[in-house]
């Protein structure tokens, strides 16, 4: 019973700050997730222009009015277009931006595995697939083989 109480306490302690997000925190999170229309290539959070500061204040005002993150993002996207989002959408063509790196890493891993397998198998001596078999030689073949082996031994 004590263990259940302890786990519940830890869970609520960790979850409480996430549930009690202030408007300032929400505005800060959103400003990290959108591109600044005033500073190209920079998020709104990192843009030093006065216009960016005004926009951050406006986002904080939306949060004070009770709007959640998705509603604020939709409003900003309606005003500035889909390029306002710093992260690509996880729907439609934006899904490719998320999937292509994973596919490339997977393909590279398969290629590396195939190359390592090929390299290690070429360095290993080839083993015969079947066990040794005995060959029956006729008497004349046996005499010829003995004569050839004797001649080779004399030459060495």
Image: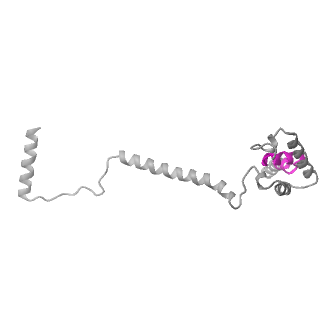
Could you say which is closer to the camera, residue 13 or residue 46? 46
Q: Residue furthest right?
A: 65
What's the coloring here?
Answer: one colour
The majority secondary structure of the magenta stretch comes to helix
Q: Residue at left 44%, top 48%?
A: 115
Of residue 109 and residue 73, the one placed in the foreground of this image is 73
- Residue reaching furthest to the bottom: 92
Q: Count the labels in the image.
A: 0
What is the quadrant of residue 47 in the picture? Answer: top right
Going 8% across and 59% down the picture, which residue do you hit?
Answer: 138
Quarter assignment of residue 90: bottom right
- Looking at this view, is 77 or 117 the one in front? 77
Q: Horizontally, is 135 left or right of 51 in the view?
A: left
In the rendered image, residue 125, in percent from the top left (x then y), is placed at: 32, 47
Residue 90 vs 33, above or below: the answer is below
Tell me residue 93's x, y (percent). 68, 59
Q: Nearer the viewer, residue 21 or 41?
A: 41
Q: Position of residue 135 (x, y in %)?
A: 16, 58
Q: Which residues are magenta?
A: 14-36
Q: Is residue 51 left or right of residue 87?
A: right
x 7%, y 52%: residue: 144
Quadrant containing the C terminus is: top left
Check residue 24 for magenta coloring: yes
Instruction: Give the image location of residue 60, x and y in percent.
Output: 90, 48
């Amino acid at each position: 019973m004590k263990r259940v109480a302890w786990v519940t306490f830890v869970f609520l302690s960790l979850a409480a700050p996430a549930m009690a997000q202030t408007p300032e925190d929400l505005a800060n999170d959103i400003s990290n997730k959108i591109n600044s229309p005033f500073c190209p290539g920079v998020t709104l959070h990192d843009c030093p222009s006065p216009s960016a500061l005004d926009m951050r204040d406006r986002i904080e005002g939306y949060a004070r009015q009770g709007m959640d993150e998705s509603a604020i993002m939709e409003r900003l996207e309606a005003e500035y277009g889909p390029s306002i989002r710093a992260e690509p959408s996880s729907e439609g063509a934006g899904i490719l931006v998320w999937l292509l790196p994973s596919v490339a890493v997977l393909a590279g891993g398969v290629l590396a595995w195939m190359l390592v397998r090929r390299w290690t198998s070429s360095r290993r001596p080839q083993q015969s697939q079947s066990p040794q078999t005995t060959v029956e030689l006729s008497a004349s073949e046996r005499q010829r083989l003995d004569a050839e082996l004797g001649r080779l031994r004399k030459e060495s």
